[in-house]
Image (spheres, rainbow, N blue to C red):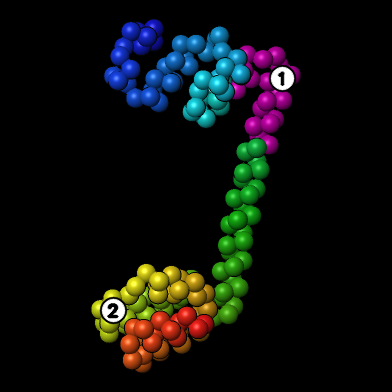
Amino acid sequence: MPVFERTKPEDVSPELAEWIRFFNNAEQETEETVMEHYTNPNIHKAFRALQALSADDEARQLAEMRERALSDEVSELNAARLEGERIGEIRGEKRGETRGERKGMRRLVVETLKLRFHVVPDRIMEKLEAVKDVNALGSIHRQSITADSLEAFEKYISSL
């Protein structure tokens, strides 16, 4: 990679240039110089990995334990998020709702408005997206059929 030092900066991307500079100088780098001279967070991570590999056994074990703990924390947070989503779906199903039903009702309202008024403004779309109750969406759909104008429909949906 020493050839890189003789290339023109415009011949390589800034990201690639940063990695090559890191590889060429990794042995001389300190944590302070890496943080100061390299913007890519993956280079910071690579530097820490190199430090862990070259450290003594105890330091390497501590670094590995820290990495495992961070990885476990991310896994636990993802599992908790998925569990929360599953519980939310179950609660919705107990109320006779599913995400698909809500999406279908919204689509029905939008298609009705397009057929009747040829347009559905973004502000109405935003209000529809905010409605989470299938029964309310059913009422909104009935109003989309009977409203005298798009303005009257928007006034109705704004009152919810």
Numbered badge on residue 59: 1
Q: Residues within 10 Å of mark 1 (few under 14, many from 20)?
A: some
Q: Residue at x 40, y 74 (%)?
A: 124
Q: Nearer the viewer, residue 3 or 69?
A: 3
Q: Which mark lies nearer to you, 1 or 2?
A: 2
24 displayed left or right of 61: left
Q: Is residue 126 above or below residue 159?
A: above
Q: Residues within 10 Å of mark 2 (few under 14, many from 20)?
A: some
Instruction: Find out whether residue 113 is within the magenta segment.
Output: no
Amino acid of disc 1:
Ala
Q: Could you tell me which secondary element the residue under label 1 belongs to? A: helix
13 displayed left or right of 68: left
Residue 57 can be seen, yes or no: yes
Numbered badge on residue 77: none
Residue lying furthest right in this view?
58
Residue 104 image position (x, y, % from top left)? 40, 75
Q: Quadrant of residue 20?
A: top left
Q: Which residue is mark 2?
A: 114
Residue 99 image position (x, y, % from top left)? 48, 71
Q: Nearer the viewer, residue 109 or 56?
A: 109
Q: Which residues are magenta?
A: 48-69
